[in-house]
Image (tube, rainbow, N blue to C red):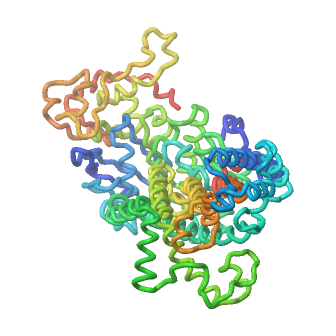
């Protein structure tokens, strides 16, 4: 059976001042019902554009190719009207910053119920009752009263949970969570991640978590895809990819996580940044896009475009030299996330 | 969830209780007190300014021959208290003002209050017609321009709004007069009512409202007909201005994350535009609309003159020409009070639209 979402060879070109430039290039991944899949990468690696593509909310003039099938329907060629009916109802989004994603001057109740009523045809009172349940589910204290309050009256963590309640209101099957915890402090972060985990277990919700934070990934994701400059670097089961990274970029991301305990342990380095910075849109180098920053680059990396190939079952790697195959020593932090 | 969550603050939503109503009254009282002080300040400024203008009220009002008669001049000055020192004159004026006495006009020989009561409703009716028209047309077109940004409807509307704000009012007034009254004869060219009709029984002084209240439909029709041309002319500038302003503030809000979030919810575009974009945009739109209404009320001189509309603009103009001090002061105080009232109304509307203002 086909998974709920199957993205194959997705390419997204965005209009820039110098013409169309690829933001996502040759990306493939699946998300099954009840599964949490993480897409990781630095800012500008095309993560958010992937989510916008699935919602049909790309900027004017953007072009897509490849395929993104949701429940058997091709999202890339779906008529606008049908795509709109899908948005919110089947595929919902929680975005990065809860202080800007909730409307500042509409009451929470309106924001939770408006699309519920539109998509599900609920009466005002039925929608309200459901909204109260939903706010209770995301652990908002005194949900009755919260309906009449405004986002500005809640803390950041509560706003993010309200945003999740808004996203879940029309009972979607797939949740796109774009950096759902970036703006939050660590304890609140853990609460949100546990909430996502509970929802997938209780409701069979499929979640695509988009983040630059591998710590968040390792806490909740079943499978992980690492993107660099719009392309897939490596993907596979979380334990595989994070415990035995094969792509130098994944390795670099893991090393770039802070390790406070390193202060007591001379064998460890507190934080090792990846030298250089990711290329901007339209300035992606030829060959492997990561080669200018890669410590293991060989001459072929500058010319040959690496394709993702299976290295073990379900583990794809776009790095033919595969320098970490045997030396890929276990990274330090499988158990130190979130 | 976890202990971390129970440490989060409980929302501090403040329901609309007696306490917040008391806050509202305190706010209103403060603003009214400030308004009174401002009005007094304005009387002082206009008093000083009228004294600085070269010219003698006696000469302006009595005519050339009487000015040569010292007895007549002295009598005029004594009648209007002009023979007293300036601070005393001002003190006397203020004392009367507090009791609601605005003095007597030197040209109409009626109380300024009676004059204003006659002219203000006429101007108010005209300005209200113009501002309502401008809001409906300007805001609607501004929304259209923003939604169709950089496509043809936007390009067309950009030209329209530029024309609206840059064509001089007197020129539009003359052009419209020439075309719609003189050439086509579609609309009356002046006055507030057809010559055969008598004004409706006075309730508000606005002929349209009074006629409707009295059920005099033919009078209402004629009053509306007479409102159209001067109203349209007055509205051209405000339509252009509100169109540009609405477009700009809509575009600013369209770029927000919460608009993208509204689209991601699969709401119909109409709901996104009206509820999620126009509503917050209204906050800046009503600020401009309030100012525009104020300037419509005080700036109708040209239009009132061309369309022989017996309103405040014409009254202010003739009073200034004749250095009719009590009348000038009366107009200034009224215009100041109107501005203060409009600003207060706009501030109250902010609170209606934006809960952040209401709750802070």
Asked if residue B256 can be seen in this view, the reply is yes
Q: Quadrant of residue B305?
A: bottom right
Above or below residue A331? Residue B261 is below
Q: Observer-nearest residue: A118 or B189? A: B189
Q: Residue at x 59, y 73 (%)?
A: B309
- The quadrant in which the C terminus of chain B is found is top right
Give how far across and how far down residue A320 sits, in percent: 20, 32
Residue placed furthest toward the front: B69
In the rendered structure, the answer to whether residue B99 lies left or right of residue B264 reads right
Give how far across and how far down residue B40 sits, in percent: 76, 47
Above or below residue B196? Residue A91 is above
Q: How many marks?
A: 0
Give how far across and how far down residue B45 sits, in percent: 68, 45
Asked if residue A148 can be seen in this view, the reply is no
Give how far across and how far down residue A112 sits, in percent: 60, 58
Q: Quadrant of residue B322?
A: bottom right
Above or below residue A188? Residue A37 is below
Above or below residue A189? Residue B266 is below
Q: Observer-nearest residue: B303 or A173? A: B303
- The quadrant in which the N terminus of chain B is found is top right
Residue placed furthest toward the top: A266
Q: Observer-nearest residue: A85 or A30? A: A85
Q: Quadrant of residue B146?
A: bottom left
Q: Residue at x 75, y 83 (%)?
A: B201
Q: Residue at x 47, y 46 (%)?
A: A177
Q: Residue at x 17, y 35 (%)?
A: A286
């Amino acid at each position: 059976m086909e998974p709920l979402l199957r993205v194959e060879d997705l390419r997204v070109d965005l209009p820039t001042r110098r013409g169309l430039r690829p933001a996502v290039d040759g990306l493939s991944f699946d998300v099954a019902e009840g599964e949490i899949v993480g897409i990781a990468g630095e800012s500008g690696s095309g993560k958010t554009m992937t989510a916008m593509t699935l919602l049909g909310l790309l900027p004017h003039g953007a072009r897509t190719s490849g395929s993104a099938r949701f429940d058997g329907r091709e999202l890339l060629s779906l008529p606008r009207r049908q795509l709109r009916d899908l948005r919110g109802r089947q595929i919902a989004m929680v975005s990065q910053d809860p202080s800007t994603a909730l409307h500042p001057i509409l009451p929470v109740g309106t924001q939770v119920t408006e699309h519920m009523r539109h998509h599900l045809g609920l009466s005002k009172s039925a929608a309200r009752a459901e909204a109260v349940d939903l706010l209770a589910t995301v652990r908002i204290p005194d949900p009755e009263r919260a309906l009449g309050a405004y986002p500005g009256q809640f803390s950041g963590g509560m706003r993010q949970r309200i945003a999740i309640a808004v996203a879940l209101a029309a009972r979607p099957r797939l949740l796109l969570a774009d950096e759902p915890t970036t703006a939050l402090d660590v304890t609140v972060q853990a609460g949100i991640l546990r909430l996502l985990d509970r929802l997938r277990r209780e409701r069979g919700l499929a979640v695509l978590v988009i983040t630059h934070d591998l710590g968040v990934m390792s806490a909740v994701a079943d499978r992980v895809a690492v993107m660099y400059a719009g392309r897939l670097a490596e993907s596979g089961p979380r334990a595989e990819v994070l415990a035995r990274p094969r792509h130098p970029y994944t390795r670099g991301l893991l090393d770039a996580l802070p390790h406070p305990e390193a202060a007591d342990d001379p064998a460890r380095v507190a934080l090792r940044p990846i030298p250089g910075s990711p290329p901007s849109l339209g300035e992606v180098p030829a060959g492997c896009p990561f080669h200018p920053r890669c410590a293991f680059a060989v001459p072929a990396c500058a010319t040959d475009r690496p394709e993702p190939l299976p290295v073990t079952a379900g583990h794809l790697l776009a790095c033919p030299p595969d320098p970490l195959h045997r030396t890929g020593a276990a990274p330090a932090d499988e158990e130190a996330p979130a | 969830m976890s202990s971390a969550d129970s440490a989060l603050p409980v929302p501090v939503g403040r329901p609309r209780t007696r306490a917040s109503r008391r806050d509202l009254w305190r706010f209103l009282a403060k603003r009214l007190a400030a308004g009174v002080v401002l009005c007094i300040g304005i009387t002082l400024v206009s008093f000083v300014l009228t004294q600085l203008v070269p010219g003698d009220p006696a000469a302006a009002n009595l005519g050339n021959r009487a000015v040569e008669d010292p007895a007549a001049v002295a009598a005029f000055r004594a009648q209007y208290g002009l023979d007293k020192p300036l601070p005393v004159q001002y003190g006397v004026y203020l004392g009367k003002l507090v009791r609601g006495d605005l003095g007597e006009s030197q040209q109409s020989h009626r109380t300024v209050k009676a004059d204003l009561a006659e002219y203000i409703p006429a101007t108010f009716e005209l300005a209200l017609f113009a501002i309502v028209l401008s809001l409906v047309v300007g805001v609607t077109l501004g929304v259209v321009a923003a939604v169709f940004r950089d496509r043809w409807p936007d390009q067309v509307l950009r030209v329209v709004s530029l024309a609206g704000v840059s064509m001089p009012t007197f020129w539009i007034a003359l052009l419209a007069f020439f075309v719609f009254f003189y050439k086509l004869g579609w609309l009356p060219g002046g006055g507030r009512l057809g010559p055969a009709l008598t004004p409706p029984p006075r309730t508000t002084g606005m002929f349209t409202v009074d006629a409707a209240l009295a059920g005099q439909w033919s009078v209402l029709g004629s009053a509306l007909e007479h409102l159209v041309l001067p109203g349209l002319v007055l509205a051209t500038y405000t339509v252009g201005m509100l169109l540009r302003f609405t477009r700009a503030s809509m575009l600013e809000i369209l770029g927000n994350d919460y608009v993208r979030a509204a689209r991601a919810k699969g709401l119909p575009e109409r709901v996104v535009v009206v509820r999620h974009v126009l509503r917050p945009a209204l906050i800046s739109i009503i600020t401009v609309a309030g100012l525009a209404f104020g300037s419509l009320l005080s700036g109708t001189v040209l239009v009132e003159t061309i369309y022989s509309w017996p309103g405040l603009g014409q009254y202010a103009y003739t009073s200034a020409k004749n250095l009719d001090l009590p009348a000038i002061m009366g107009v200034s105080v009224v215009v100041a009070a109107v501005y203060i009232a409009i600003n207060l109304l706009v501030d109250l509307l902010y609170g209606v639209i934006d809960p952040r203002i209401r709750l802070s």
